[in-house]
Image (cartoon, rainbow, N blue to C red):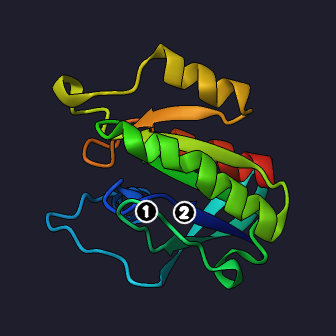
Amino acid sequence: MIQKKICMVGCSGVGKTSLVHRYVESIFPARYHSTVGVKIDRKRATVRDQDITLLLWDLEGGDTTVELRPSYLRGAAAVFYVVDGTRPETLDLLFELRRQVTDAVGSVPAIVALNKCDRLTDWAIGPDDLFRLEKADLPAFQTSAKTGERVEDAFHWLAHETT
């Protein structure tokens, strides 16, 4: 079976681990646990009539800056960036993270999850932000690990891009 490594990248607390739990186990964890280093999960998927295993590398995030370990990124078939839609500074840091990823592995398929879309009253991502992502050729999905909204869609889209 073909395996594809997908790295989950973003600041601390944006919901990387929760998105993985929602996608792999169909649950939203009741308690927050900060990832230390890297946590790896697997999910089988069918893409273009081909069975593949997605290796989801949930990378540790930082609070205001993130220094990615190039060794964690090596071999990545794609990158799943996660931004907290209620914290616009996490979107600002995304572009620095993308530079680090590109330096480590070159250009690979990527997507941005604008997570926590269930928190409408706190939402802080606007049309100008979406335009910045579009201009940077970064497809974006508004997701909610809590409700499951668009989580499957985002992972499926990225898996499709890796095959």
Q: Percent position (x, y) of residue 112?
A: 56, 42
Q: Quadrant of residue 111?
A: top right
For badge 1, the amino acid type reads Val
- In the picture of the structure, the residue carrying the numbered disc 1 is 20
Position of 151 with respect to 123 (left or right) is right
Question: Residue at left 51%, top 25%?
Answer: 129
Q: Percent position (x, y) of residue 162?
A: 79, 54
- In the picture of the structure, the residue carrying the numbered disc 2 is 8
Viewer-proximal residue, 67 or 52? Answer: 67
Position of 150 with respect to 116 (left or right) is right
State whether residue 8 is above or below residue 137.
Answer: below
Viewer-proximal residue, 105 or 62? Answer: 62
Residue 152 visible? The answer is: no
Judged from the image, the secondary structure of the residue bearing numbered disc 2 is strand
Q: Are marks 2 and 1 in contact (CB under 8 Å)?
A: yes
Viewer-proximal residue, 78 or 154? Answer: 78
- From the image, which quarter does the N terminus lie in? bottom right
